Image (cartoon, helix red, strand yellow):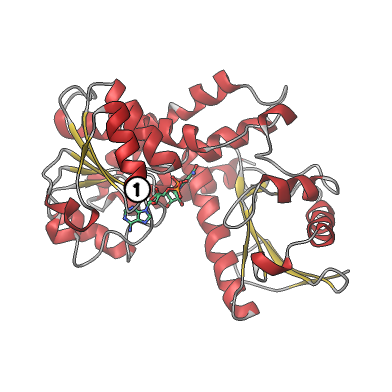
């Protein structure tokens, strides 16, 4: 097993981890631990080069620092990536080696699920280190994050409704969801329960039919979904859905959904704002999952009721973001960045 450090400005620690026997080649990035240990998922992808993997792990770990700072989880930001094809390279030896590398950081980096890494993989990692979150509920872990992410979106939408309409009630409000998978499907259900008129679209037609039959949602074809006029547009499928083509076509007052990296280019938040549409920064509203996972680290261990109460904080965090946006005359995504940086700076100066 070989471990070496890669020097990167503004990152606390970046490690290259190699294990010849299992073929493991991974990178672990600890971006910032000012607010607490660096928690962030482990992903596995057939990156074309180590540089490509490094770019990804640096970008993602930095993103986790800001996400956790705004979500007030008491955590810092980190991430790990395994370079290789998940279809062919996964093995017990590989995940055990990865567990040893994670363990060598003694809790400074805590791992979780991410792209192409599931609970069975993490259970193997867990044999070698206790610094693993997001396992099965039966193992005193926080379980599947999706319902918590969905609930966090409801909380975040309430803050946005309050800001735009002066009331956080969903009664009679029309919400259009793109993507009704694990998070979007549950979110649609929660909105329906709260009296919203829900319209859904998804490339998975069976899923759309199933949900419409169960809950009486309206459905629209994915290709034409932006023609639907609504109060809230919730991107819950994939990233980059907000771009130069779609932003002028939006027919909503609020964009608030769980998808990561909704803006193709973060600068385009200015274009959304110029149209008088409130954009709810994705990493603030979709923090329910990370807040839930962070509760595993609380003294006394995971407790769902505590997690739900902490997810409610998304409401206040968004109110702060909207205030900063107005005060400094900047888009909401820049305001959330400012809030995160302020919190980290304050923690540094008071510690
Ligand atoms: P999922 O795979 O369960 O659901 C995604 C849904 O989007 C699927 O039903 C899929 O058919 C649909 N879809 C994909 N491409 C589409 C397209 N072009 N048009 C319409 N529908 C499309 O994923 P999920 O866990 O629900 O996550 C959804 C988004 O939220 C992702 O961007 C994810 O990164 C983000 N997110 C998820 C969580 C979580 O807790 N699961 C947390 C934070 C962020």
SS of the residue under disc 1: loop
Left or right, 254 with respect to 5, comes to: left
For label 1, the crowd category at 10 Å Cα-Cα, with few meaning under 14, some 14 to 19 and many 20 or more, is many
* Residue nearer the viewer, 350 or 234: 234
Q: Can residue 176 be seen in this snapshot?
A: yes
Q: Is mark 1 within 8 Å of ligand 1?
A: no
Rendered-image quadrant of the C terminus: top right
* Residue nearer the viewer, 95 or 106: 95
Left or right, 189 with respect to 68, comes to: left
Position in image of residue 75 (x %, y %) = 61, 42
Number of numbered discs visible in the structure rendering: 1
Q: Is residue 303 above or below residue 340?
A: above
Position in image of residue 289 (x %, y %) = 52, 38
At x 30%, y 21%, the residue is: 193
At x 47%, y 51%, the residue is: 341
Q: Is residue 124 above or below residue 54?
A: above
Position in image of residue 300 (x %, y %) = 72, 22
Q: Is residue 71 above or below residue 329?
A: above
Q: Can residue 156 be seen in this snapshot?
A: no
At x 28%, y 39%, the residue is: 323
At x 57%, y 57%, the residue is: 115
Label 1 belongs to which residue? 281
Rendered-image quadrant of the N terminus: bottom right
Position in image of residue 259 (x %, y %) = 39, 50
Question: Residue at the top extreme?
Answer: 305
Left or right, 85 with respect to 178, comes to: right
* Residue nearer the viewer, 120 or 156: 120
Q: Quadrant of residue 117?
A: bottom right
């Amino acid at each position: 097993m070989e471990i070496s450090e890669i020097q990167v400005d503004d990152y606390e620690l970046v490690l290259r981890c190699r294990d010849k026997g299992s073929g493991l080649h991974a990178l672990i990035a600890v971006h910032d631990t000012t607010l607490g240990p660096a928690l962030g998922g482990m992903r596995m992808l057939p990156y074309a080069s180590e540089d490509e993997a490094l770019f990804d792990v640096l970008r993602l770990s930095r993103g986790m620092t800001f996400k956790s700072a705004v979500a007030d989880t008491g955590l810092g930001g980190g991430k790990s990536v395994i370079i290789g094809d998940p279809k062919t390279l996964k093995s017990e030896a590989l995940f055990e080696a990865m567990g040893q590398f994670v363990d060598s950081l003694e809790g400074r980096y805590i791992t979780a699920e991410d792209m192409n890494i599931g609970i069975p993989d993490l259970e193997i990692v867990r044999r070698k280190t206790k610094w693993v979150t997001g396992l099965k509920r039966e193992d005193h872990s926080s379980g599947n994050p999706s319902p918590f992410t969905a609930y966090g979106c409801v909380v975040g939408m309430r803050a946005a409704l309050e800001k735009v309409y002066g009331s956080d009630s969903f009664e009679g409000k029309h919400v259009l969801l793109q993507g009704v998978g694990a998070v979007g499907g549950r979110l649609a259900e929660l909105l329906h329960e709260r009296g919203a008129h829900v319209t859904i679209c998804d490339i998975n037609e069976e899923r759309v039919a199933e949900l419409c039959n169960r809950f009486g949602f309206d459905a629209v074809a994915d290709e034409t979904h932006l023609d639907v006029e609504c109060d809230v547009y919730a991107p819950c499928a994939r990233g980059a859905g907000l771009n130069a083509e779609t932003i002028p076509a939006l027919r909503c007052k609020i964009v608030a959904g769980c998808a990561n990296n909704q803006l193709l280019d973060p600068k385009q938040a200015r274009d959304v704002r110029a149209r008088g549409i409130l954009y709810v920064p994705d990493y603030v509203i979709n923090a329910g999952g990370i807040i839930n996972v962070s509760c595993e680290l609380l003294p006394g261990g995971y407790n769902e009721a505590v997690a739900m109460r902490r997810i409610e904080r998304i409401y206040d965090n968004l109110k702060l973001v909207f205030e900063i946006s107005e005060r400094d005359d900047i888009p909401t995504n820049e305001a959330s960045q400012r809030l995160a940086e302020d919190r980290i700076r304050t923690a540094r100066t008071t510690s």
